[in-house]
Image: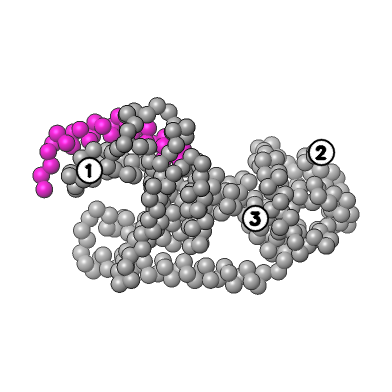
C-alpha cells in the first residue's frame, strides 16, 4: 500500500514536537508504578520509554487509515513492570485501578487462544489526571488528545520470552520453522510461571516462623529502600534475638504490618541515609531491630546483651530516637 508522503511528513513533524513531552509522561508514570510495587513490597523491575519517531512512522506506513494522526496511537508513552510471580500481576493491576491520578481506560490480558502459542501479558491503558501531567502540553487537549500511557505488566518469564522473540521476529516475517521455534518457548515460559508459583506456595507452607519473619522483613526492606537483600543473615539475626519477641512470636507478622504503617517514612529515611554506619542497617534485619526498639526495648536489650555488644544497640536506639 502506497502512503501519501505528506501524511508521513505530518506525522514526523508532529511527533518530533511532542517526543520530549511523552518521555516526561512515561517517566512520571514509571515513578508512580515504582511507588506501587514498593508499597506492595515486590522486588519488581520498572522500565519506561517514549515511542521513537521511527516507530511512529512505521505505524503510519503500516496502517495509514488507522494511524493518520498521533491521537490514534495509544502507546506514545509506555511503562512496564516485571514481577517474579504470576499472581503479582493482578496485585499491581489492582493498585493501578485505584490510583488517585491514573484512570484505567482499558485493561486487556493478552492471552492467546488455547490452540495458539503467542505473546502473553497484561496491558492497561491509563489516562493521567490534569494535575499529574508533567510540564506544558504541546497540543490542545480535547476529545482525541487525552494524555495516556500504556502500562504493561509481565512476569520475568513472560518478559524474557518477549525480549528474545522481539530480537528474532519483531516486524519481520521469519520462515515458519523459525517462528515455530520462537513460539514454542511460550509454553516453557507458561510452565515456568506455573511451577515457580507452586514451588513458592509449597515453600511458604513448609517455612518455619523465623524464615517467615525473615521473608516478611525482606519484603518490607525492598518497599522502604527499593533494594533486594539476601534473607540468610536476617534469619540468623532474628534467631539470635528471637527471645525479644516473647509471646508476640506467633503474631509478629501482623504486628510488623502495623509498625510499618505507622513509621514507613521514618524507616525509609534511616535505611537510605548515605552516611550510615549503624550495625545491620544494610539488611532487612534493621526493620526488625527498629520495631523491637520501639515496641519492646527492655526485652530487646535483655536478649541483645547476652549475644551482642550492648554499645551497638545503644547506637541503634539513638538513631531511632524518642517517639
In the image, which is nearer the foreground, mark 2 or mark 1? 1
Badge 3 marks a residue whose secondary structure is: helix
Quarter-of-image position of residue 117: bottom left
Side of 116 relative to 10 (left or right): right
Classify 243 as above or below 291: below
Q: Answer yes or no: is residue 49 visible.
A: no
To which residue does mark 1 refer? 67
Side of 229 relative to 248 (left or right): left
In the image, which is nearer the foreground, mark 1 or mark 3? 1
In the rendered structure, which disc, 2 or 1, sits on the residue that comes first in sequence? 1
To which residue does mark 3 refer? 218
Region in magenta:
1-29
Q: Is residue 5 magenta?
A: yes
Side of 54 relative to 21 (left or right): left
Badge 1 marks a residue whose secondary structure is: loop
For label 3, the crowd category at 10 Å Cα-Cα, with few meaning under 14, some 14 to 19 and many 20 or more, is many
In the rendered structure, which disc, 2 or 3, sits on the residue that comes first in sequence? 3
Q: Residue furthest left?
A: 2
Magenta part mainly helix, strand or loop? helix
To which residue does mark 2 refer? 322
At horizontal 55% and vertical 54% (from top left) the residue drawn is 43
Percent x, y of residue 307: 85, 57
Side of 185 relative to 243 (left or right): left
Cα distance between the residues tagged 2 and 1: 61 Å
Amino acid at each position: 500500500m502506497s502512503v501519501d508522503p505528506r501524511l508521513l511528513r505530518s506525522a514526523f513533524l508532529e511527533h518530533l514536537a511532542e517526543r520530549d513531552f511523552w518521555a516526561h509522561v512515561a517517566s512520571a508514570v514509571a515513578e508512580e508504578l515504582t511507588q506501587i510495587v514498593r508499597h506492595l513490597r515486590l522486588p519488581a523491575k520498572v522500565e519506561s520509554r517514549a515511542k521513537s519517531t521511527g516507530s511512529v512512522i512505521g505505524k503510519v506506513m503500516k496502517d495509514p487509515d488507522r494511524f493518520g494522526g498521533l491521537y490514534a496511537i495509544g502507546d506514545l508513552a509506555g511503562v512496564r513492570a516485571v514481577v517474579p510471580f504470576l499472581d503479582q500481576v493482578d496485585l499491581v493491576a489492582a493498585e493501578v485501578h485505584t490510583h488517585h491520578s491514573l484512570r484505567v481506560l482499558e485493561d486487556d490480558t493478552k492471552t492467546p487462544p488455547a490452540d495458539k502459542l503467542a505473546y502473553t501479558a497484561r496491558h492497561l491503558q491509563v489516562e493521567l489526571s490534569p494535575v499529574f501531567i508533567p510540564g506544558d502540553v504541546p497540543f490542545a487537549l480535547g476529545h482525541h488528545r487525552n494524555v495516556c500511557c500504556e502500562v504493561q505488566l509481565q512476569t520475568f518469564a513472560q518478559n524474557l520470552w518477549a525480549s528474545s522473540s522481539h530480537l528474532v521476529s519483531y516486524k519481520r516475517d521469519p520462515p515458519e520453522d523459525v517462528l515455530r521455534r520462537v513460539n514454542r518457548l511460550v509454553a516453557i515460559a507458561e510452565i515456568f510461571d506455573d511451577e515457580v508459583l507452586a514451588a513458592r506456595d509449597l515453600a511458604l507452607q513448609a517455612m518455619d516462623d523465623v524464615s517467615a519473619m525473615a521473608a516478611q522483613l525482606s519484603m518490607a526492606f525492598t518497599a522502604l529502600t527499593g533494594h533486594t537483600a539476601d534473607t540468610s543473615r536476617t534469619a540468623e539475626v532474628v534467631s539470635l534475638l528471637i527471645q525479644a519477641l516473647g509471646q508476640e512470636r506467633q503474631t509478629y507478622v501482623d504486628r510488623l504490618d502495623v509498625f510499618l504503617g505507622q513509621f514507613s517514612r521514618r524507616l525509609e529515611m534511616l535505611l537510605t541515609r548515605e552516611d550510615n554506619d549503624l550495625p545491620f542497617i544494610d539488611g532487612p534485619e534493621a526493620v526488625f531491630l527498629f520495631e523491637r526498639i520501639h515496641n519492646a526495648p527492655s526485652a530487646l536489650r535483655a536478649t541483645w546483651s547476652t549475644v551482642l555488644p550492648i554499645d551497638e544497640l545503644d547506637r541503634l536506639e539513638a538513631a531511632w530516637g524518642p517517639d
